[in-house]
Image (cartoon, grey):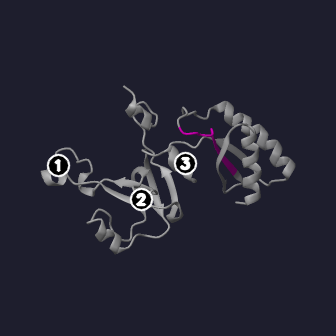
Amino acid sequence: MSANLHTLIGSSVQGLGLELVEIERSAGGLLRVTIDHPWEAGQEEQLINVEDCERVTRQLQYLLEVEGVDYKRLEVASPGIDRPLLVEKDFERFSGEMVDLTLKVAIGSDAASDGQGAVNANRKKFRGTLGKSEAGGWQIVLENEAAKPLKPGAKVSKKKLQAPAFAMGFTLDELKEARLAPIVDFKGRRKSPQDDSQP
């Protein structure tokens, strides 16, 4: 993806009061642009609607034609439930949410032993609850394998049911990819951290 194209589209989207999340080019000439509302700590979450996508589509169709950008079809959409986390602000925004992380380099056997078996060696992918680490960086809290929900009728010792969670710290430089875990509640929407704080 051209840095110039990213800057061009990002500036145009920003001019409409929105923000660019990511741009993808797919086979067949599809140009997919993902947008979102800007976020500030403490403000209410706003969801992207059809009107937002239509406004951006009209703006970009004109812009891309003027700039001579080669594409066959333009698709403008909201980030969806598996939204990518790309910058520090994204991690702040979704602290307390369940996320899927992929590391650039698999953890070694020394990290596995430090975790007392909570994390297997040569593993790159993890799912856990995102939060700030005591050291000031980021971490995800991984549930121990033994603490995962049981299948109906399965028997397990009380010792296994009390298995502790394990916090794994990371820096953004160590990540190949980070996304919100695609989990929804029965109402068909993602549960926000604010839901737990409301009476």
Instruction: Please state the horizontal and vertical placement of residue 92, each as a whole percent of the image.
Output: 51, 47
Q: Which residue lies furthest to the right in this view?
A: 66
* Amino acid marked by disc 1: Ala
Crowding near the residue tagged with mark 2, few <14, some 14–19, many ≥20 C-alpha atoms within 10 Å: few
Q: Which residue lies furthest to the bottom in this view?
A: 109
Image vertical order of residue 164 relative to residue 39, above or below: below
* Amino acid marked by disc 3: Asp
Instruction: Please state the horizontal and vertical placement of residue 13, each as a whole percent of the image.
Output: 72, 42
Image marks 3 and 1: residues in contact by CB distance under 8 Å? no
- In the rendered structure, the answer to whether residue 87 lies left or right of residue 125 reads right
- In the rendered structure, the answer to whether residue 24 lies left or right of residue 127 reads right
* Amino acid marked by disc 2: Ala
Residue at the image position 42 percent from the left and 50 percent from the top: 131
Question: Which quarter of the figure is the N terminus placed in?
Answer: bottom right
- Kindly identify which residue carries mark 1: 154
Instruction: Please state the horizontal and vertical placement of residue 91, each as a whole percent of the image.
Output: 51, 50
Q: Is residue 38 magenta?
A: yes
Residue at the image position 30 percent from the left and 68 percent from the top: 114
- Examine the rendering and report whether any part of residue 29 can be seen: yes
- Examine the rendering and report whether any part of residue 186 can be seen: no
- Kindly identify which residue carries mark 2: 135
Magenta segment boundaries in residue numbering: 31-41
Secondary structure of the residue carrying tag 1 is loop
- Kindly identify which residue carries mark 3: 90
Image vertical order of residue 189 relative to residue 26, above or below: above
